[in-house]
Amino acid sequence: MTTEELIERLASHRTIGQAPREELAWIAAHGFLRRLEAGAVVSRHTEVVDGLYILLSGQMSIYVTRGTARRKVMEWREGDVTGVLPYSRMTNPPGDTIVEETADVFTVLRTDLPGLIRNCHEVTASLVHVMTDRARRFTSTDLRDEKMKSLGKLAAGLAHELNNPASAALRDAKSLAATLLSAEEAARALGAARLSSEQQAELDAVRDFCVTTMNPAGHTGLELADREDAIDAWLTSHGVNQASAEDLARTPITLEALDRLGRVMPAPALDAALRWIAGGCAAHALVADIERAASRIHALVAAVKGFTHMDRPLDQDVVDISGGLTDTVALLAGKARAKSVAIALHIAPTLPRLRGNSVEVNQIWMNLIDNAIDAAPSNGHVTVTASREGAGIVVRVEDDGSGIDPSIKESIFDPFFTTKAIGEGTGLGLDIVRRIVQWHKGEIDVDSQPGRTVFRVRFPVAGGG
């Protein structure tokens, strides 16, 4: 291809084609054209990008490995440019750039870019716009990926936390049906017994005592067995079916209360009375357990709504740091328990609110506290504090893990840097945290030594307060 033909192809290029002819001629004189077949690797994430790529035909894409997945994050076609752009600080790309369809690529080497900036002002201006748009697209992709990762953590934590109370509620509901049936049968037997007013009064007194009195806590298995043996012996001595012994042992009923019933009731009526008491106490206990499980589920749903702000308008600009930290700790409690890590949360009263995006700020807490739980040893501790300091709010997330190696401390906020095993981290969490903090005009830093690592986030309070 002659120089004139090359300039004509550059003149028809969508991105730089409107530049003056002399600028296109300069580019044509300071680069080279090559045809790349499908599958060719234009640049690798492990290597420095060699120059600016002007795509004259075909298609190429960049693939980034995040965790164990390799995914296309951007593609370029005829009329696009990529590679190193003027004023770009990029050295190694975030992924591998692969040719998808046979492509004609004109390359201006990295070493010639200073000359391009000096001699091709309109081309440079166009390329700076491309660089800004590319950075925005990569940022948007990174943020979306990290939000999806946070959503995965949220879903996993929520499923784990909901499973126990939901299973308990289901189990107790099934038991309640059988218990109510047994109590109804006993009630019918009592009705047939035609109790006197004295017998009915004593029966009501004992049942009310059992229903309203808290069951003694802390019974060991041996103590419960001893209690069952004592009640069984009492039933035997009064000629009553011992089948109720186990159920009665789990109620607060005392041998003195049994004696009072035994003095006023014959054996047939006494058997029905004790089954009715045991069924009523069991039903009340099951209802209380179901209520506790439902309350736990309600609290978890409220924490999710608070974390995601799903019940607030999208333009909400008031950030409640206290509520966000509380909700985040609640959602990560299951993960902490699974690792036997204790989380302590200390929030100063009347902490002022911020102006910003609540969902994004909560993502800061999700990443930092989740990382702290990962870093803490088994039976370790994570401490989260939030306080007013001067004209700002300071949140600290501390763990007692092994600390951050000083040789990598300066790199932990870099995109794609991670110390976690393959598949466990994307290397984007702390980069996203840093960006969100900066968007809210805040600061983040870390102090680490063996046994104590503290991430500190400081947000200014508008108007001091």
Image (tube, rainbow, N blue to C red):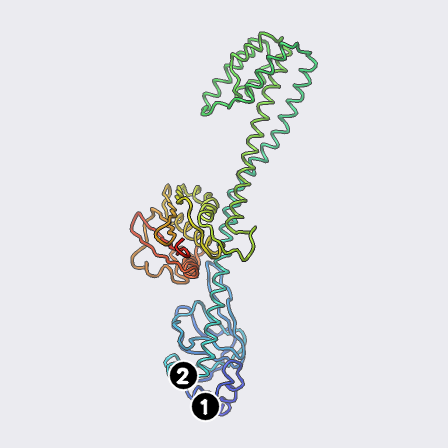
Residue that label 2 marks: 116
x 48%, y 70%: residue: 62
Q: Amino acid at mark 2?
A: Leu
Circle 2/circle 1 CB separation < 8 Å: no
- Name the one closer to the observer, 448 or 44: 448
Looking at this view, name the residue that lies furthest to the right.
192
x 51%, y 13%: residue: 255
- Name the one closer to the observer, 453 or 379: 453
Tell me residue 388's x, y (percent).
Answer: 37, 49
Tell me residue 462's x, y (percent).
Answer: 42, 57
Tell me residue 269's x, y (percent).
Answer: 64, 12
361 on left or right of 163: left
x 29%, y 51%: residue: 449
Q: Amino acid at mark 1?
A: Glu
Tell me residue 65's x, y (percent).
Answer: 46, 63
Q: Is label 1 in a helix, a strand or a loop?
A: helix
Residue that label 1 marks: 22
429 on left or right of 174: left
Quadrant of res 457: bottom left
Badge 2: how crowded within 10 Å, few (<14), some, or many (20+)? some
- Report the Cα–Cα distance between label 2 and label 1: 12 Å
N-terminal label among 2 and 1: 1
Q: Is label 2 in a helix, a strand or a loop?
A: helix
Residue 373's mark? none
Count of all numbered marks drawn on residues in the image: 2
